[in-house]
Image (spheres, rainbow, N blue to C red):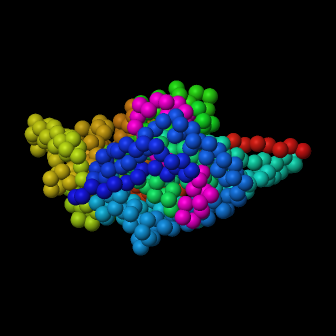
Amino acid sequence: MTRSIFDAWHLPGVEPDRLATLEIGQLTCRYPEPTPELIGASVQVLRESGRALRERPVAELVRAIDGAAARLADPADPLRVEAGQRVGAATGYSDAMTRLVLDRMAADWRADPLQRLLAAELGDPGVLDGFRPAADGTDGRRTRAYGPALAFQVFAGNVPGVAVTSLVRALLVKAPSLGKLASGQPVLPVLFARALESVDPEAARALAITYWPGGSEDAEWRAVEAADTVVVYGGEEAVAAYRDRAAGRRLVVHGPRFSVGLIAADALRDDLPTLARDVAQAVATFDQHGCVSPHAIWVEETPGATAADFAEALADALAETESELPRGRVSTAEASAIQQERAAAELKGHAAGASGTRVLTGQGTRWTVVYDPEPALRPSCLNRFVRVHPIPDLADAVDLLAPAGGQLQSVALAGGRDTRDRLAHRLATLGATRITTFQHLPWPPPDWHHDGQEPIRELVRWVDLET
């Protein structure tokens, strides 16, 4: 496959002096060398643009974002065509996976979902435009919501589109953003900014996004110093580093998270093939690299329907999914990790005999289902590698998740008609922030409480005007 070149930056009003390159998958990305001068010039443009942004009605900004999203949603639009090519080249996703991700992500950036998000969190989105009567309205007090004067956003590289969603949230509260792109996902935020520029150049000037490598301390310091709000997506080390750097500023953190699945006995009895297909789709989406991707499934067994039966059905479903939604490229290291995990599971199975672990695999390393009678949580090596554990009672699975509860994000729960609320309460107590179905697991609604927070409200500060 021929490598293509992509300019991984959108810096309105700033002309980079020197460019460096980064190899990502089949993509060669060019980016400006990060210097305090480059960041300083971008900050100056953002401050000017931010003042103009704050004077615009939020409804105008929703229309602008919707127009940009419409371009990325239209298969015939040249920008959407480029997004398909570039995202696939960078991530290694198959063409089918790239189309699915772009379609579902762009749908969340359209006007109706954005308006629902604003209404869900703010009640009256007009509080972003002016002082509005307070909720009780009894004392004549009015209130208004203000977004950051400047947000510095640090993005992670696991799923395309998450960075765009974060930029959209900032635009909705009229905050200009300086975004640091992740090495694994530098494409979609830049193309979104270009789409926004084509429909609303003024709004696009409130975005400055570029890649720069970790360790660029001078640039990092300048960016953090300029911002009043710092938004960080990433692993534990990145989050810890910015907690220190952002002292005295509002810090919004989306740290490392993972998801799992629970299947109650009644769901196992109802429609096993459909259930297996839903689980296979959840495992396959994002090639299992999303925070919402399930690492393991616990199955509450019942007479005539066992976890082993489900593991077989899931293997069949993953084989079918592979033909419809092929897995993308994996690195040599990723392929090696899959083979090592398979070998360890097979060795464990041989030692235990007929009642032990079983390994079901697709062609090459395409997909793996490990039936493991030991119920302890073990994180997946990803790329469609999932463990299935039998368990007599789903309440026991909740206990097994307790040590990792602080990083638990979504739990897909199938069945459990009589115990669903009780299980959800226990999972929430552990730290889970979303209990859903396998069908919806990969695609949270735009107005979900991201990591247990309200993503719009956590960006704004409130001002009361009293009479």
Return the x and y of residue 21 as percentages of the image width and height: 35, 45
Asked if 233 appears above or below 242 in the picture, the reply is below
x%, y% of residue 317?
25, 61
Quadrant of the image for the N terminus?
bottom left
Q: Position of residue 316 (x, y in %)?
A: 21, 60
> Which residue ends up furthest to the front in the rendered image?
17
Magenta-tinted stretch: 197-224
Front residue of 30/390: it is 30
Residue 385 seen: yes
**Is residue 217 located in the magenta-colored stretch of the structure?**
yes
Q: Is residue 132 above or below residue 180?
A: below
Q: Residue at x 25, y 61 (%)?
A: 326
The extreme bottom residue here reads: 76
Residue drawn at x 67%, y 62% as measured from the top left:
59
Nearer to the camera, 348 or 30? 30
Q: Residue furthest right?
A: 467
| Occupied quadrant, residue 67 | bottom right
The residue drawn where x is 47% and y is 33% is: 239
Observer-nearest of 52 and 166: 52
Image check: 72 left or right of 340? right
Q: Quadrant of residue 58?
A: bottom right
- Any magenta on residue 464? no
* Residue 263 can be seen in this image: no
Q: List x then y, in percent, for residue 168.
A: 56, 54
Quarter of the C terminus within the rendering: top right
Viewer-proximal residue, 219 or 438?
219
